[in-house]
Image (cartoon, rainbow, N blue to C red):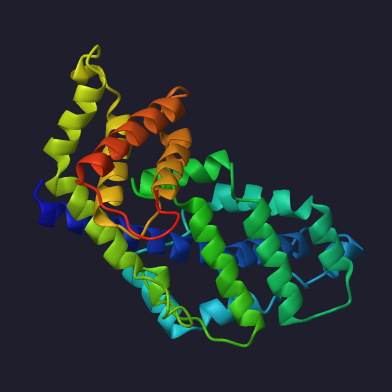
Amino acid sequence: MSLKEAQAQLEMSCRATRSLYLFMLSIIPALTEEARARIDAARSKFNPTEEEKHPNLKFVENAIAPILAGDPDFQKAVSREKLSWDQYDVLLRNLYDSIRGKSYYSRYMASPERSLAEDVRLFVRIFEEEFVDNADLEDILEDLSIYWNDDLAYALTCCCRTLDSFAAGERWSLPPLYQSEMAGREGMDSDKRFVTELLRAAYCNYGTFYDKIAASVPKWDKDRLFVIDMVLIICGIAEAKAFPEIPVKVTINEYVDISKYYSTPKSRSFVNGILDGIIQEMLASGEIVKSGRGLL
């Protein structure tokens, strides 16, 4: 693909992460309706128990679901992305059963307190504990978007930030794509500039960096090098070259850490050794220039 197409894919992947955030936040009204449907069904039984006749309505009357359901901006954003939990009733049922079995839910239901802050604490706990490593949810996310398989933890963190903002009395607003564009973070270096320049540096120098990697492992057939390792090393070289203010050790450590999640068990030492060796050679030749203390 062309550089322009690659940049468009980068922007699309960022937007997809924000869509995942919207999808996960919208589970609050959906889960609340699942609980309400359970209560209504129990009340409608031929011979309901006293508990079923007079259920504890604290969860179904939580303050967060109405905030999201009644916010036109949130509803417009969810509708625009065509996001809905309607067809995932099995997941909602299983999720609600799991939550009801947890001690933090029992304590919430038993507490006489009724406040937005307490509802926020409950849903933050749900987002922290119920979605990570949920196989059924992973299957749903994989079917919906190829961009979502690695971004769930980040999206859940953003959901918790939104819940905390509700507790502080703030209205919902659509988060910007990049953290440096968030309110109160204007002094941060631009995330968008960083990722765009990193992509450009890796793309435009791909052939040169690829040849350097191949030359550093002469006993290997370069076509047998693991593609993810190649991509990580090339991005690492690109970062070291394009950003003179970033210390070499920081760059190497970051890509070694990424290799733990995306590559083979042996990739950590391979990426570390090859990336460090090539960067040191390019520093010696002047192809990479670093200035300032602690940058080497």
Q: Is residue 151 above or below residue 269?
A: below
Q: Which of the pair 31/226 is nearer the observer?
A: 226
Res. 291 image quadrant: bottom left
State the image coordinates of residue 51 (x, y, percent, origin top left). 88, 63
Q: Residue at the spot x=50%, y=57% of the render?
A: 154
Residue at the location (44% across, 37% down)? 256
Q: Position of residue 237 (x, y in %)?
A: 27, 43
Report whether residue 271 is seen. yes
**Residue nearest the viewer, comparing 168 with 224:** 224
Residue 23 in the image: above or below residue 219: below
Residue 296 at x, y percent in the picture: 39, 48
* Direction from residue 296 to residue 231 in the image, left or right: left
> For residue 29, what is the image quadrant?
bottom right
Residue lying at 32% horizontally and 71% vertically, measured from the top left: 80
Query: Which residue occupies the extreme left position in the image?
Result: 2
Percent x, y of residue 165: 59, 79
Name the residue nearer the viewer: 259 or 5.
259
Question: Can residue 47 be seen in the rendering of this structure?
Answer: no
| Left or right: where 249 falls relative to 112 | left
Give the mark count: 0
Residue visible at 61% across and 66% down?
Answer: 33
For the N terminus, the quadrant is top left
Q: Is residue 136 left or right of residue 282?
A: right
- Asked whether 154 or 233 is in front, the reply is 233
